[in-house]
Image: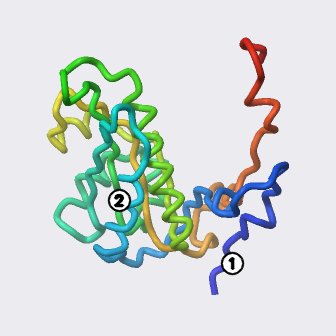
Amino acid sequence: MINRPDPRQHRKPDWPIETIFIDRWSPRAMSGEALSARELSTLFEAARWAPSTYNEQEWRFLYAHRDTEHWQSFFDLLVEGNRVWCHNAAVLVVVLSHKVFSRNGKPNPVHTFDAGAAFENLALQGAAMGLVVHGMAGFDRAKARQTLKVADDFDIEAMIAIGRPGDPARLPSELREIEVPSGRKKVEEIAREGPFAF
């Protein structure tokens, strides 16, 4: 049996919210078990319902299942610190966003914002399914653009490791120590009425 931390024992909201927001966190311990195409499609289905400016839906996802022809090229994009634990992921994903509006080619100032909303939908769906969904900044963007042949009018936003929960005891000791759901700043530290006062 996996001794996985329970987010609800580590996190207490100050205001009433849906429990899915507490249950979503970013563990690193994964089992290495495969995800089905149906499960992955369910995650992307959740992502596609995210809000976007002018309904642009400017996010794109490139992915590789472990033990397939594309896996190594995705895995090789990761920095060493992420390779240590991502080798047990079921799927690696690169998140892209279209920098210009498809309707007129003008710059879209919120393409990154909208892609983040799509990721959050995917992450919340993953939490509801009992999966690990861990977003990452630690990878080589220039190499990703070249290796994955990403067009110039798309930004490379992030990578995601997705998998089934694994045993934290199998992580390196420095990662085992931080394999607990993190807390959050108080509302008054992130939201103020009126002008900037942080």
Q: Quadrant of the C terminus?
A: top right
Label count reads 2
Q: Residue furthest front?
A: 54
Residue closer to the observer: 194 or 20: 194
Give the residue displayed 43% in from the left and 57% down from the top: 161
- Residue 89 is left or right of residue 17, and the answer is left
Q: Residue at x 38, y 21 (%)?
A: 109
Tell me where residue 178 sits by quadrant.
Answer: bottom right
Q: Residue at position x 32%, y 67% from top?
A: 41
Residue 81 screen position, x and y as percent:
49, 48
Q: Position of residue 173 (x, y in %)?
A: 65, 61
Amino acid under disc 1: Asn
What label does residue 188 carry, if any? none
Picture colour scheme: rainbow
C-alpha span from label 2 to label 1: 29 Å
Q: Which residue is mark 2?
A: 44
What residue is drawn where x is 31% and y is 45%? 77
Decide: is 146 above or below 7: above
The x and y percentages for residue 167 are 59, 75
41 with respect to 196 (left or right): left
SS category of the residue bearing label 1: loop
**Residue 53 on image: x %, y %:** 38, 32
Residue of label 1? 3
The answer to whether 193 appears left or right of 99 in the picture is right
Q: Is residue 103 left or right of residue 169?
A: left
Using the image as rendered, state which of residue 15 and residue 120 is in the foreground. 15
* Marked residue nearer the N-terminal end (2 or 1): 1
- Quarter location, residue 191: top right
Q: Amino acid at mark 2?
A: Phe
